[in-house]
Every structure is written in structure tokens, then in C-alpha cells.
Image (cartoon, grey):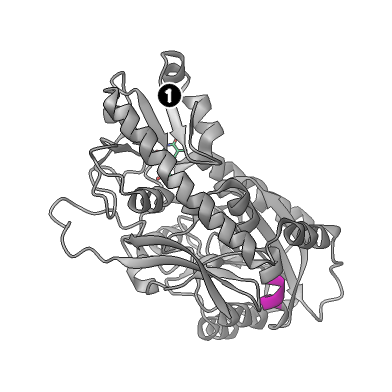
């Protein structure tokens, strides 16, 4: 049975940055989270139609961050060395940040957002500009045979029907093939109070426990888990066919399952406590921003991450509290944040001497940003975050 534990109010499409004049009739939905006490899966109560989110105007551009470029470059190298795949398929290949490290003649990309699919096609990768389904996997198998490595980053948690997703993977894996995927981790979200991991695209926030339950019923098994720091805390899950005796199950699987159980992820009470913490976080953030306003401080936001859409819409933060948001992504600059309609400008135009406090929207890139913004910090500029609790630094 699915039990609701969190209500983040009416929310827009988090990555649909809008133009001046497009403020009316914006699509809104109820952002609520539920816990399934059978599979232990945490999901959104109401899913948003994929076509509304993943289309030719999708804004999230993975290569905008040096941290992510290094992350995928290092991983591609390691997977090649450790597993020596003869061919590779990536589900949700974005701008090719991962597959660019593999040979185009033996690598396939699947990416429903046409703006990004065109990029990998131009890089000579066979690209299917489609959503990942068992139907597509059958077609790919007919055309290219089975795959030794299927990879996905920050994509599987976007897909509503996980049974179909995993059936599609199982169908396409070679005998000793592996499926590796990484997505934000539920335990890290709960530990950090980072409720902004919840937005339209994140249909599910995965625990290892829930994934194990759902993968198993699709003849797949987890054999290794890496705990990662990217995207505010993620897990990389390594999966094999249940019939594959070649890969041994690593200790990291049992370790993560026990850790999740000890934390209380299998107990609904933990989710109710999380919900109380989120309400407190909202009160603290809004009162801090109001206080800064009263003191005459200029407050902006740094990074128009999709997560900020959740925070600002849930907390009712608009231009009266946060003047504008700076972001490095060309397709976001000159547009407005979904829902709140706060303007987005380039750091060159907006991150200057007049700023007193910057809400750190891209808190998951805190180290990268702190290293970059030493001038701002040394002249007394402050950042504010809500993770793990509302604080200035
Ligand atoms: P993400 O957390 O969804 O990856 O989004 C981070 C956003 O922050 C993305 O739009 C790029 C932006 N950003 C900056 O504006 N400046 C920076 O230094 C970094 C690291 C990210």
C-alpha cells in the first residue's frame, strides 16, 4: 500500500525555464511523496507526463559542470578496465558526457530529448531519440544484438514504470553483461533534509532496498553498490542477470541494506519525521530571508538548479525575497524560474560587488563553487543554504 508522507504544494515543471510573456497558464501539479510499504519504494504521488519534461527544449546540460565531466570521464575509464565491455549502450545520454569516452562504432545512445540526441548523432554515435521501453529494447536487440554494458546516470529514477524498464534491460543484456546505473540516494536525502531532490523528473528516489525488491522480480540482481557524493549523494548500482554466475555479490550490497534498515528506511515513522523536518526548514529559510530583507541586504540565488524550483515554490519565495538567480547555463540565462518567475541572469551580469548574500541553489557543487568564489567570500559575501539545515557561511 502507498502511504503519503510529504506535501510540497503546487509545483511547475522544474526544468522548464520560461520566457517573458509565458507566465500565464503555466502547468502545475501537486508534488507529494508516497512510500510503498510492500516494495519500500519512495515515489511521487502524481507523475507528470514524460513528454512535458523530456523534449527538444530540455535544459539540463550535464557538461556545464567540471565536477560532472571529471566524474564521468573517470568512471568510463574504470568500467572499461574492470569489465572490458565489447559494446555499450547508455540510457539517457544527454550531451554525450559519458559515452564520448567510448568508441562510436560499438556504442549506442538512447536520449528522448532531441536537442541532446542531435549532439550525440553529430558525434557519430548511433542515437535513438526515444524513451527507454521494452519495445525499444527489442528493436535495438534485433538491430545490434545484446549489450555487455548498459549504463544510465540520473535517468532511471525519471521513469515511471520500473518493471518495464528493468524487463527492457534484462532483454538486452548479454550473458555476462552488466547494467550500471546511478541516481540520487534516498538515505542521503533523508540524512541531509534535502527535500529538493523531489521534483517532477524524480519520479522515484531510490533506496538499495527498494531497488533490490523490484530488480529481483525482473530476474536481475544487485552485485555491487558504490556510494557517491555527486548530485547531493547518489548510489551507483551494479546489476547482473540472476542467472549470471560470473559476477560475485560484493559486501557493499549487504552493507547498504543493513545501513538503510538501521536508519529506519523500512519504517513509515521515519518518513513522517522527515516531513516535520521539511516544514521546519521552510519556516527557517523564509524567516532568514525576511530578516535579511529588513536589514537591507541584497539577496540573490546562485545556480538555477531544478532543485531550487522545488524550494522556492514550496516556500513561496519570489522576487521580493530573492532578486534574481545567476546561472552559467546559456539556455537558462534571460529566462525565468518556473513558478516563481524570478529572473535568471549570467554570473557576469549578476554576481558582483552589490551582492550581500547568495542562496546556494547548486549546493551539491558547494566545493567547486567555494573554490571558484574566493574573491566574493574574502570581501565578506555570504552564502545561505537549507542543507542540512538553514545556515549562512
Ligand atoms: P544541478 O544541481 O541540477 O546540476 O544544477 C546546477 C545548476 O547550477 C546548473 O544550472 C548549472 C549551475 N551552476 C552555476 O551556475 N555555477 C556553477 O559554478 C555550477 C557548478 C553550477
Residue at 30% x, 47% y is 332
The reply to whether the magenta stretch includes residue 219 is no
Q: Quadrant of ligand 1?
A: top left
Rendered image quadrant of residue 48: bottom left
In the picture, measured across the screen, residue 206 lies left or right of residue 111, that is right
- Find numbered disc 1 in the image and state the secondary structure of the residue it sits on: strand
Query: In the image, is residue 215 above or below residue 201?
Result: below
The spot of residue 51 in percent (x, y) is: 35, 72
Q: Is mark 1 within 8 Å of ligand 1?
A: no
**Magenta span main SS:** helix
Q: Is residue 139 visible?
A: yes
Q: Quadrant of the N terminus?
A: bottom right
Q: Mark 1 = which residue?
A: 382
Residue closest to the eye, 91 or 362: 362
Residue 381 in the figure: left or right of residue 354: right
**Magenta residues?**
211-215
Q: Measured from the top left, where is residue 174 in percent x and y?
A: 72, 77
Residue 341 against residue 12 in the figure, above or below: above
Residue 232 spot, x, y in % from top left? 57, 47
Q: Position of residue 64 (x, y in %)?
A: 44, 43
Closer to us: 188 or 5: 5
On the question of residue 361 being in view, the answer is: no
Count neighbours of disc 1 (C-alpha within 10 A) and say few if under 14, some if 14 to 19, many if 20 or more.
some
Amino acid at each position: 500500500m502507498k502511504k503519503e508522507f510529504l506535501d510540497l504544494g503546487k509545483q511547475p515543471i522544474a526544468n522548464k525555464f520560461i520566457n517573458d510573456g509565458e507566465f500565464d497558464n503555466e502547468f502545475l501539479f501537486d508534488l507529494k511523496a508516497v512510500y510503498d510499504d510492500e516494495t519500500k519504494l519512495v515515489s511521487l504521488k502524481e507523475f507528470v507526463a514524460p513528454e512535458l519534461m523530456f523534449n527538444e527544449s530540455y535544459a539540463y546540460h550535464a557538461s556545464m559542470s567540471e565536477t560532472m565531466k571529471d566524474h564521468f570521464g573517470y568512471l568510463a575509464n574504470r568500467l572499461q578496465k574492470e569489465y572490458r565491455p565489447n559494446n555499450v549502450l547508455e540510457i539517457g545520454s544527454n550531451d554525450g558526457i559519458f559515452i564520448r569516452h567510448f568508441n562510436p562504432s560499438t556504442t549506442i545512445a538512447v536520449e528522448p530529448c532531441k536537442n541532446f540526441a542531435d549532439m550525440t548523432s553529430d558525434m557519430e554515435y548511433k542515437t535513438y531519440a526515444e524513451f527507454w521501453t521494452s519495445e525499444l529494447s527489442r528493436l535495438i536487440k534485433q538491430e545490434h544484438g545484446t549489450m555487455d554494458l548498459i549504463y544510465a546516470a540520473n535517468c532511471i529514477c525519471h521513469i515511471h514504470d520500473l518493471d518495464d524498464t528493468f524487463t527492457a534491460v534484462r532483454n538486452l543484456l548479454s550473458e555476462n553483461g552488466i547494467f550500471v546505473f546511478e541516481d540520487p540516494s534516498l538515505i542521503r536525502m533523508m540524512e541531509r533534509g534535502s527535500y529538493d531532490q523531489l521534483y517532477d523528473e524524480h519520479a522515484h528516489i531510490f533506496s538499495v532496498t527498494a531497488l533490490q525488491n523490484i530488480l529481483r522480480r525482473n530476474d536481475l540482481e544487485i552485485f555491487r553498490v558504490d556510494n557517491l557524493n555527486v548530485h547531493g549523494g547518489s548510489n551507483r548500482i551494479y546489476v547482473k542477470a540472476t542467472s549470471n554466475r560470473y559476477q560475485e555479490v560484493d559486501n557493499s550490497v549487504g552493507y547498504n541494506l543493513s545501513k538503510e534498515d538501521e536508519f529506519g528506511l523500512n519504517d513509515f515513522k521515519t518518513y513522517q519525521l522527515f516531513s516535520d523536518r521539511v516544514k521546519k526548514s521552510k519556516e527557517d529559510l523564509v524567516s532568514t530571508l525576511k530578516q535579511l530583507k529588513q536589514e537591507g541586504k541584497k539577496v540573490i540565488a546562485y545556480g538555477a538548479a531544478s532543485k531550487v524550483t522545488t524550494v522556492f515554490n514550496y516556500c513561496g519565495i519570489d522576487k521580493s525575497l530573492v532578486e534574481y538567480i545567476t546561472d552559467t547555463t546559456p539556455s537558462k540565462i534571460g529566462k525565468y524560474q518556473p513558478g516563481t518567475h524570478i529572473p535568471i541572469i549570467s554570473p557576469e551580469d549578476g554576481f558582483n560587488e552589490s551582492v550581500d548574500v547568495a542562496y546556494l541553489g547548486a549546493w551539491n557543487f558547494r566545493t567547486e563553487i567555494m573554490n571558484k568564489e574566493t574573491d566574493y567570500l574574502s570581501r565578506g559575501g555570504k552564502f545561505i543554504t537549507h542543507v542540512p539545515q538553514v545556515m549562512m557561511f
